[in-house]
Amino acid sequence: MAGAVPGDWTTDRRDTFESLALPHYSAVLRHALRLTRHEQDAEDLCQETYLRAFRRFGALESSDAVRPWLLRIATNAFIGIYRRWRRRQEAVWSPDDVERRADEAVGVEVPESPAAVAVHGEVLAAVETLPVAFREAVTLVDLGETTYEEAAEILACPVGTVMSRLHRGRALLRERLAAYAAESGYTLAA
């Protein structure tokens, strides 16, 4: 990668990029689906992410950091074109549709149990009500299975900030899900 000239679209550069970046496509797509809540926009965001990543491939410092680098590019691209998607809110899916479609898109088996589906939907609906900073941290770490360090890189903030946002986001989720948990018998009513 060192010495790669911007705009140098050689076969070697393309092959190296593909071998490092394409294995992370499903993670980028899941992240894009969570951000956009719209399948076509998520696919567009993935395409934009990979285009931007290829153009900036020479700036990648380590092949170990490809996944967080791609997720950060996707997040930044989404923020940059958020207003366009905002106008299309009439096509937004419910939180349980987002997660189901994200799972289907990457080949994850969707839970069949009605109870599991109900709990899953309640949790996702509660996540959607979180302030953006907390929702991003919870989505990346708890739902997206990224490490604190990867989330910090994606969100361009210190690891301590990610941990703080997670703590506060999880506390808000506990509050918002307390009544549902008590009604469903998951906790004792206070």
Image (spheres, grey):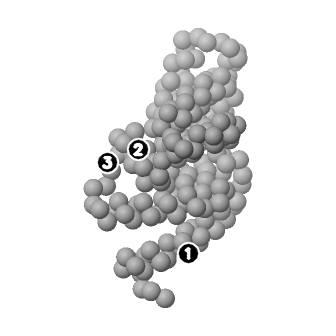
Residues at marks 3 and 2, CA–CA distance in whole angstroms: 11 Å
When the figure is inspected, residue 35 is found, relative to residue 14, above or below; the finding is below
What residue is pinned by disc 1? 175
Location of residue 154 in the rendering, given as x and y in whole percent from the top left corner:
64, 45
Give the residue type at disc 1. Glu
What residue is pinned by disc 2? 101
Label 3 vs label 1, nearer the camera = 1
Tag 2 secondary structure = helix
Please tell me in which quadrant of the rendered image residue 67 appears.
top right
Tag 3 secondary structure = loop
Toward the viewer: 24 or 125? 125
Tag 1 secondary structure = helix
Give the residue type at disc 3. Glu
Number of residue marks = 3
Toward the viewer: 183 or 162? 183
Q: State the residue at coordinates (40%, 39%).
A: 105
Q: State the residue at coordinates (47%, 63%).
A: 123
When the figure is inspected, residue 148 is found, relative to residue 66, above or below; the finding is below
Give the residue type at disc 2. Arg
Q: State the residue at coordinates (70%, 37%).
A: 80
Q: Which mark is residue 109?
A: 3
Please tell me in which quadrant of the rendered image residue 185 appears.
bottom left
**Where is the N terminus found, in terms of image quarters?**
top right
Location of residue 111 in the rendering, given as x and y in whole percent from the top left corner:
31, 55
Nearest to N terminus: mark 3 or mark 2: 2
Nearest to N terminus: mark 3 or mark 1: 3
Residue 165 visible here: yes
Q: Residue furthest bottom?
A: 190
